[in-house]
């Protein structure tokens, strides 16, 4: 999910200098504004679901595209070989998605 847009109904959060610096560092590390980072943090905790950066959303889209390409490739392969290839690819892609989900949940401080 892309960082939510506050749409002008925002509010002020007062932070001390050290926390403000940490917020700017955290936001920069994710490639978002401090406002977007705080919005994502709140959304992650309220929804109990990880929030995804634009880069991560692109990674997920590339995995979905890879799955489609795999399906297209397997269409012409003998059944036994196709099952073997599909099983290996499934394990690899499942591991990638699981890692992404676990990492995001840990980052936002929510249960996976």
Image (cartoon, grey):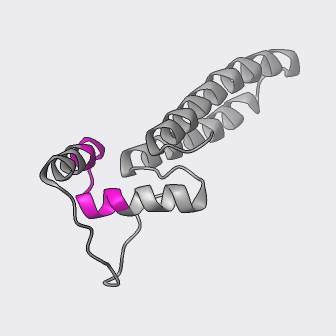
Q: Nearer the viewer, residue 60 or 24?
A: 24
Quarter-of-image position of residue 68: top right
Picture quarter containing residue 102? top right
Residue at coordinates 37% horizontally, 45% vertically from top-left? 55
18 relative position to 74: left or right: left
Q: Is residue 34 magenta?
A: yes
- Name the chief secondary structure element in magenta: helix
Reply above or below: 79 against 43. above
Is residue 2 something one can see in this rendering?
A: no
Residue 89 located left or right of residue 15? right
Picture residue at 41% right of the left edge, 67% below the top: 4
Where residue 62 sits: x, y (%)? 50, 41
For the view shown, which residue lies furthest in the right direction?
79
Residue 49, image x and y in percent?
Answer: 58, 52
Residue at the image position 32 percent from the left and 62 percent from the top? 36
Range of residues picked out in magenta: 26-38
Residue at 49% from the left image edge and 40% from the top image edge: 104
Relative placement, left or right, of 105 versus 9 is: right
């Amino acid at each position: 999910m892309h960082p939510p847009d506050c749409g002008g109904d925002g509010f002020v959060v007062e932070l001390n200098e050290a926390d403000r610096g940490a917020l700017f560092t955290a936001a920069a590390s994710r490639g978002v504004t401090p406002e977007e980072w705080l919005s994502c943090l709140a959304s992650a905790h309220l929804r109990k679901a990880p929030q995804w950066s634009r880069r991560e959303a692109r990674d997920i889209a590339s995995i979905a595209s890879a799955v489609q390409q795999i399906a297209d490739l397997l269409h012409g392969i003998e059944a036994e070989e196709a099952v073997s290839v599909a099983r290996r690819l499934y394990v690899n892609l499942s591991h990638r998605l699981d890692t992404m989900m676990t990492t995001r949940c840990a980052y936002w401080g929510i249960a996976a």
